[in-house]
Structure formats: C-alpha cells, structure tokens
Image: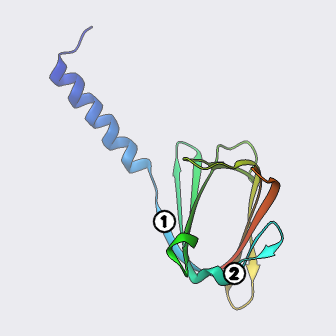
C-alpha cells in the first residue's frame, strides 16, 4: 500500500516526535577535583565547575563532559557513548579530533559529604604516541 506524500511526511513527523519523548536528558553540575593528561596535572587550566549531560536513546547511553578553561583555548568538550556491550567500557564520539580513543572508562563511586565521585579515564593514540586523560569530578547526590 502506497501512502501519499503528505501522509508520509505526517507519519515521519509522528515517529520523530515519539523518538524525542524517549530521549531522557539530565544535566548536572559538578566540581572538578583533579585533571591530568598523560600523567601531567592539568587541573589549574580549568574552571572548578563542570557541566555533565546524560541521555539515553534506544539503549545507547550518552555522556557529555564540558570543561571551561581559564583561557578559551583550554575549554574542552568530551562526548562518550555506551552501546550496552559492557557497563564500564565506553567509546568516545569523535568530531574532527586527531586522537583515536582506545578505551574509555567511566565509573561512579560514593564520596565524602553526600557526594558521588565520577572518574573518567580514557586512553588514546595521538601524533605523539599513546596517552591517557583522567578527570575526577564530585557531584552532589
């Protein structure tokens, strides 16, 4: 059965509207405790407050970390996703970046004073060889 062009557009709009309702966003603000890049402490390059956005679409979990730099060139945004293979191993979504992630780990544990501690650790291969980045962030429960 063929649908007319207007009915097809209306059906596509309905499917798009339904997919938006499945998209559960949550944005939280955390405090950067520690940041390092290939073993070198870089915490002082960033503002203490970081923004984290979490979402889930059709069992694919997305995690975005936004770091505001003291200077604009130090600002970073990392996007990770987990497609359900392993709850601890994530992949980094890359857009025009010259490093290739090997593994990304995001873990959450209980911290002091009614907080959770999020540890983001990812290994990559760049122009200068292998490296890793570690970010430790405290968020309120």
Label 2 secondary element: helix
Q: Is residue 139 visible?
A: no
Tell me residue 109's x, y (percent).
76, 73
Tell me residue 128's x, y (percent).
79, 54
- Does residue 4 sit above or below 116 in this rendering? above
Quarter occupied by residue 36: bottom right
- Does residue 58 sit above or below 11 in this rendering? below
Q: Nearer the viewer, residue 15 or 127?
A: 127
Q: Residue furthest bottom?
A: 113
Q: Using the image, tell me which numbered label, if any, was put on residue 43.
A: 2
Left or right, residue 64 beside residue 86: left
Q: Residues within 10 Å of mark 2 (few under 14, many from 20)?
A: some
Q: Nearer the viewer, residue 18 or 107?
A: 107
Residue placed at 59% from the left, 51% from the top? 61
Q: Residues within 10 Å of mark 1 (few under 14, many from 20)?
A: few
Q: Are marks 1 and 2 in contact (CB under 8 Å)?
A: no
User: Residue at label 1?
Assistant: 26
Tell me residue 38's x, y (percent).
81, 66
Residue placed at 33% from the left, 39% from the top? 16
- Does residue 36 sit above or below 95 in this rendering? below
Figure disc tally: 2
Residue placed at 48% from the left, 65% from the top? 26
């Amino acid at each position: 059965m063929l649908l007319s062009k207007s009915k097809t557009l209306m059906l596509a709009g309905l499917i798009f509207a339904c997919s938006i309702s499945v998209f559960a966003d949550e944005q939280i603000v955390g405090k950067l405790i520690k940041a390092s890049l290939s073993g070198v402490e870089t915490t002082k390059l960033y503002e203490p407050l970081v923004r984290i956005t979490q979402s889930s679409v059709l069992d694919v979990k997305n995690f975005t970390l936004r770091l505001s730099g003291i200077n604009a060139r130090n600002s970073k945004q990392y996007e990770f996703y987990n497609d359900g293979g392993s709850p601890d191993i994530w992949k980094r979504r890359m857009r025009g970046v010259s490093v290739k992630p090997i593994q990304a780990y995001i873990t959450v544990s209980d911290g002091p004073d009614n907080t959770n501690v999020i540890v983001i650790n990812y290994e990559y291969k760049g122009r200068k060889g292998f490296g890793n980045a570690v970010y430790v962030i405290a968020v309120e429960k």
